[in-house]
Amino acid sequence: MEKNRNYFVAIGLSVLILIAWQFLYVNPKIEKERIAAEAHQKITQQNQPAVTPAVPGQAQPAQGAVPGAVETRDQAIAKSARVSIDTAAVSGSINLTGARFDDLKLKEYHETVDDKSPLITLFSPSDTPDGYFTELGFIGNEVSGTVPGPTTVWTVKSGDKLTTATPVVLTFTNEKGLVFTRTISIDEHFMFQVVDSITNGSGAPVSLSTYGRVTRFNKPTTPSVYVLHEGFIGVIGEHGLNEVAYSKVENDVPAKHEKATTGWLGITDKYWAATIVPPQNLAYESKYEHFTDGRPRFQADYKQDAVTIAPGQSTDLETLVFAGAKQVPLVDGYEKSYSIPQFDLLIDWGWFYFITKPMFKLMDFFFRYFGNFGVAILLTTIVVKLLFFPLASKQYASMANMKKVQPKMEELKKKHGDDRMALQQGMMALYKEEKINPIAGCWPILLQIPVFFALYKVIYVTIEMRHAPFFGWIQDLSAPDPTSLFNLFGLLPYAVPHALMIGVWPLIMGITMFLQMRMNPTPPDPTQAMLFTWMPLVFTFMLASFPAGLVIYWAWNNTLSITQQAFIMKRHGAKVELIDNLKGLFTRKPKPAK
């Protein structure tokens, strides 16, 4: 007994040391390195020339001999002629040089929960540290002459401001007599419609190709999460969804795709995205790239097959540009209204798509009815529990039957001693006699795993959760609980290190997990018993940094499981072990007589 006790103490201390090492040393070290890397990147960028990104299929314009410092956003915007954008959802401007979308802010979203905080900036000019833009252009030849590209300065034909009611029309006429007219319109949300009309005023047939690109000079500073894809994304023709991480393109050759005539491509973040839907009547080739000449940058681009325009004739090409928040109803609506193939996959629903998306629909229904996403999470969890009640009933019924035959099991163990073969045969005969399936309790758990993972996915990836309040101190369900046990939840006047932010809801989750484990008899194996004891504490520390919505869901799910198990166990006449197990924690067992 003394040896076992020391063994358990050693394991417990090891767990505490690992937790302390992770939260007190490793996490702060990683954060410090991240901040240093960002600072170094900004210094490096300030000393590098501002380059013009390469256009697909076209030679890159020569760089200036004098390196230019990276400019502030306001400086970069002010140095070029622009047409302003102003709708209820977005604000910004179109750069007339290249007709480039490189200035866009999202009016409905702020950087923090404070409505006075800065708006989310999606696009910024290429000369800024956070350069990010979308550009459409043409690739010509000697016959076509100069065609619109990155350095082309367009002329405003009509419309001094792009709104939902007033489109903007730009023109460019080259030395060969080709007239390019670009009409840009926007809906009430985040979809730009670009119609290019090319009129051949020369005396010879002209062939030219179109290109489009989404270019970004940085990537998210937050570490990537396994359940979420951030980076390149697209649906390329019949090949379906294609997702490529930033790191993959950085370390390998560009990701090139076979030619297609339908689809879309771009770059996605957790909540925002910029994508292009090429004209769907021409074949195109596309790729995802990482450039290291000058300032490193990421680019998703395509080049379409050439279209031939006879003398005196015109052709129209329509391209869509999505730039904004990945709202689920909005993205689904665009897929249907514009016939964009699988555009709903712009939101990372994961492997269990067929479960995850209906789960969101249910949660969104409750949100629209009650106006609180936290309440929607609670109600959705109840519905899931009700749907799985028959399976849970079988699971707990199996556990109850196993408890009933426990005395007979003990008799078999005494009878057969160390004869494992005889013991196993006796147990199988007992199961058959009592009509018990010992693995019946496992199947419901296995079947529920995809559902609970889908619910976790919905809570984590959908923008509807971002900055959504619950009650009390939880003002953002997508952020961790802001309170901490180590300053008595704000009563003591000092800040707590991030590693020690163990808030109220993580503690509630840990308590409910502890109670759920105490619903069953303590495992006879000392190692299993030790794991049951320490697991709630470990999970409390682990989940403390998770979004509050996930922790609330977990705590609520544990509470429902406890209630459900107690109800079913009593209905089958089995004893609920919770009270006795809790009493046993505070009752010292008498030592056996010597």
Image (cartoon, rainbow, N blue to C red):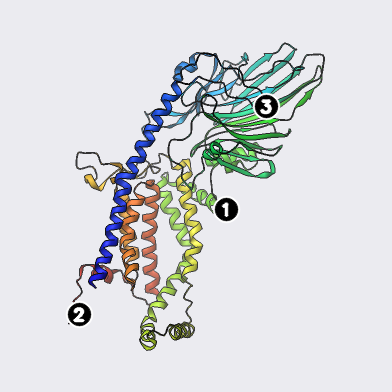
Q: Amino acid at mark 2?
A: Pro
Query: Going by the image, does 456 lie left or right of 332?
Result: left
Name the secondary structure under disc 2. loop
Within 10 Å of disc 1 (Cα), the crowding (few <14, some 14-19, many 20+) is few
Name the secondary structure under disc 3. loop
In space, the residues marked 2 and 3 are separated at their CA atoms by 85 Å
Circles 1 and 3: CB atoms closer than 8 Å: no
Q: Amino acid at mark 3?
A: Gly
Looking at the rendering, which quadrant does residue 323 occupy?
top right
User: Residue 330, can we see it?
Assistant: no
| Residue in front for this viewpoint, 132 or 593 | 593
Which of pointers 1 and 3 lies earlier in the amino acid sequence?
Answer: 3
Query: Going by the image, does 117 lie left or right of 6?
Result: right
Q: Which residue is mark 3?
A: 57
Image x and y of residue 52, in percent: 57, 21
Query: Going by the image, does 11 lie left or right of 453?
Result: left
| Closer to the eye: label 1 or 3 | 3
Q: Which residue is mark 2?
A: 592
Circles 2 and 1: CB atoms closer than 8 Å: no
In space, the residues marked 2 and 1 are separated at their CA atoms by 58 Å
Q: Which residue is mark 1?
A: 354
Q: Is residue 309 above or below residue 327?
A: above
| Residue in front for this viewpoint, 83 or 376 | 83
